[in-house]
Image: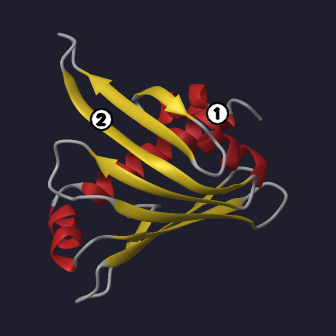
Amino acid sequence: MELKTKIHAEEGRQDLTITREFDLPLELLFKAYEEAEIVEQWMDNKVLKLENKQHGGYRFEKRDANGNVVFSANGTIHDFVPNQKIIRTFEMENAPFGVQLEFLEFEKLTDSTSKLSIHTIYRSGVLRDQLLKLPFAQGINMAHNRLQDIVNKLK
């Protein structure tokens, strides 16, 4: 089964591009990145902080059934233009990938469809390639499928 979320990573580079078309109006797609309650549902993480503004920040966390932190990530929001773009850093804590720079662009395709493009830059090609060896593509595709399903209910 072909994944709907596409990842393009050229050999020898330290960046990649993620694209996904959604059967959602642009405003609802953007809302899925803007509202903490929706982010929590599709990312399956607790949102501890989400300051959607220039120089804002965010922090996500996931705990297991025993209350142990199994995932945490944070970053700084450098630019935030509703329904257009988010520029932010992303860092998974206790992971070897370092800080990433992400450029998220939201595009209206029709009144009921939209596209998300994420250009991510890593510190090195080696770090990027290490991430790509993990089930990264399947994970982001599953998250985007949840986003589509959850936000569909808001229509």
Badge number at residue 63: none
Residue located 79% across and 54% down the image = 112
Mark 2 is surrounded, within 10 Å at the Cα level, by few (under 14), some (14 to 19) or many (20 or more) other residues, namely: some
The residue carrying mark 2 is 72
146 vs 27: above or below: above
Left-right relation of 39 to 101: right
* Amino acid type assigned to the residue bearing label 1 in the image: Glu
Q: Nearer the viewer, mark 1 or mark 2?
A: 2
Left-right relation of 110 to 138: right
Outermost residue toward the bottom in this view: 12
Q: Which quarter shows the C terminus?
A: top right
Residue 26 in the image, given as x and y percentages of width and height: 75, 54
11 vs 135: above or below: below
81 vs 152: above or below: below
Labels 1 and 2: the sequence-earlier one: 1
Left-right relation of 120 to 14: right
How far is disc 1 from disc 2 in space, using C-alphas?
A: 18 Å
Residue 79 in the image, given as x and y percentages of width and height: 63, 58
Residue placed most toward the observer, 119 or 41:
119
* Amino acid type assigned to the residue bearing label 2 in the image: Ser
The residue carrying mark 1 is 35
Residue located 48% across and 45% down the image = 145
Residue placed most toward the observer, 6 or 121:
121
